[in-house]
Amino acid sequence: MAPDRTRYPGDARSPGADPTLVPPARPSLGAGRIEAADLGELSLEAGGPRLSVTLAYRHDGPGPDAPQALVVHALTGSADAAGDWWTPLIGPGRALDTNRVGVLCANLLGGRYGSTGPTSLDPSTGAPYGPAFPAITARDQARAVWALADRLGIGRFSLVTGGSLGGMIAQEFALDRPDAVDHVLPMAAPAATGAMAIAWNHIQLELIARLGDEGLALARQLAMTTYRSEDDFDGRFGRRREADGRFSIASYLDHQGDKLLGRFDPDTYRVLVGVMDGHDVGRGRGGIVEAYRALASSGTGVTGVGIPGDILYGADQVRALVDQAAAAGVDASYREIRSSKGHDAFLIEWDQLAAIIDEALADGIARAVRRGALSDAVAGAA
């Protein structure tokens, strides 16, 4: 049987995806549940064989005639932002009001929750990819999510946001198609991953390489010490001990390591940490300021969100991102989440997050109207 060569609007704009290899069934919008979209084959920055890609995703709210928001998850997250890790922010009457705005979240390429990754079957062997899964970059991630958006018929986003790894990919997503993104809102994420974060990741990856699953649990424990703050740990645990005599903080970290083993695997962790280590929007673009000139030319707004006390991607790194964007001519601003929780505040401080998202979304919609991409009537309804 000859291959189905059905094409859809936007298919040819999916960088790296061959439209002749994309299945004909259109995935659905607005279902409010986890679904999967086969995207055909994707070429990767690292080269090598093209990768057949499926992404798990969730879309809530109206379709492309309304403003759309993209939410990108952090290291061990899933596509279920609306039903899990960002539930207080997504839904009717919330900051991302799904009565007025469509909200898309995808499990990233290489992820553990329904997207093609190390636990997927390699069609050439019939066995899971495992350690043979190819290296992925933040730009590969952005292109894969754009391929998903094309398959869904979503041509532009009024807002693109995410925290940590999600904030890195949000920037690359906007830089891939600046004219199709109205406002980008990276949270607790730099323009390029710094040496200290790479150092922490190096230790985690060494633990995994040497100890396998046990190393993954220890890597998670180490990571948890960078996700929270000294004030948070002192306030929650202090020098308290459990009934067995262990310090409460040690018991907590053991628990976090065991929890991750129940829902993740070493190879997936390695692939996604590699994405974070390689993040640098200036790579191959003449530096960070030169990279951001594309957003200045397109009129895309940028708001960087820093968290004082974040020891992983500190507030100064986010301020630097905003300053570099402004130096490129971008309309860029800085906001802060005031919290004792450290890096994880973007998953906790709901009232502050809602206010920041509301402001950025309103700005993105206004920019879309000025660009003629949204009508006043649609913008008013949103």
Image (cartoon, grey):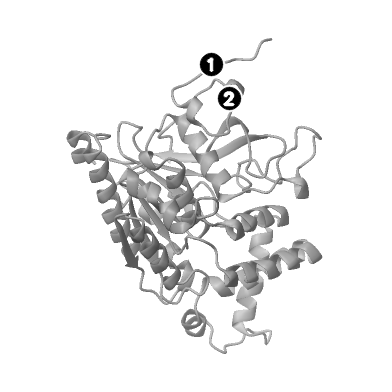
Residue at horizontal 40 percent and vertical 35 percent from the top: 30
Residue 335's x, y, as percent?
A: 32, 66
Q: Which amino acid type is marked by label 1?
A: Thr
Residue 208's x, y, as percent?
A: 74, 63
The answer to which of 116 and 157 lies nearer the viewer is: 157
Label 2 close to label 1 by CB (< 8 Å) = yes
Specify whether 353 is left or right of 217: left
The answer to which of 55 and 198 lies nearer the viewer is: 198
* Disc 2 packing (10 Å; few <14; some 14–19; many ≥20): many
Residue 168's x, y, as percent?
A: 49, 55
* Disc 1 packing (10 Å; few <14; some 14–19; many ≥20): few
The C terminus, quarter of image: top left
Extreme residue toward the bottom, this view: 239
Query: Residue beneath label 1, please?
Result: 6
Residue at horizontal 77 percent and vertical 46 percent from the top: 132
- Residue 371 position (above or below residue 257): above
Disc with the residue nearer the chain's start (2 vs 1): 1
Query: Residue beneath label 2, please?
Result: 22
